[in-house]
Amino acid sequence: MKPDPMRTVAWMLLVVGILVALAAPFWIAAEERRLKEATYRAAFSFYSDSYQRTLHRELEALSAWPMVGVGAGITTVGLLLLAIRRPEKRDVTT
């Protein structure tokens, strides 16, 4: 039996959505570490105060929830595609 390409896409969307949602906290932690290092370097260099304030605002605005929402949305599309029933094949011989 030939695999249904739509079901394959649905399963791939399901897996990708879950992976995106699970990766969000790790990505945010890495981004937070990068911004803290940039803020530390800016504090001890000749950068302007406005640049330091911008880095601080970016650091405060970090949140994993938008990425978790995107992952949930991708997973939902995959689930909807899996829930759609395939039409039954009709016997054309009669």
Image (tube, rainbow, N blue to C red):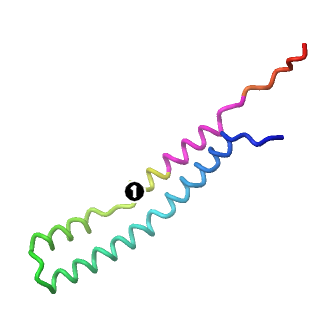
Seen as rendered, the residue at the extreme top is: 94
Q: Position of residue 54 (x, y in %)?
A: 17, 67
Dominant SS of magenta comes to: helix
In this view, the residue in front, 12 or 33, is: 12
Image quadrant holding the C terminus, namely top right
SS at badge 1: helix
Occupied quadrant, residue 51: bottom left
Seen as rendered, the residue at the extreme right is: 94
- The residue drawn where x is 14% and y is 70% is 53
Image quadrant holding the N terminus, namely top right
Q: Position of residue 57 (x, y in %)?
A: 20, 65
In this view, the residue in front, 12 or 61, is: 12
Q: How many marks?
A: 1
Q: Position of residue 12 (x, y in %)?
A: 62, 50
Reading the image, the residue beneath label 1 is 65
Occupied quadrant, residue 63: bottom left
- The residue drawn where x is 55% and y is 48% is 75
Seen as rendered, the residue at the extreme bottom is: 44
Q: Is residue 7 above or below residue 36?
A: above
Q: Is residue 40 above or below residue 92?
A: below
Magenta segment, which residues? Answer: 72-86
- The residue drawn where x is 39% and y is 56% is 65
Q: Position of residue 60 (x, y in %)?
A: 25, 66
Q: Is residue 60 magenta?
A: no
Describe residue 35's horizontal placement relative to residue 16 as left or right. left
Q: Is residue 22 above or below residue 84?
A: below
- The residue drawn where x is 56% and y is 54% is 16
In this view, the residue in front, 74 or 94, is: 94
**Amino acid under label 1?**
Trp
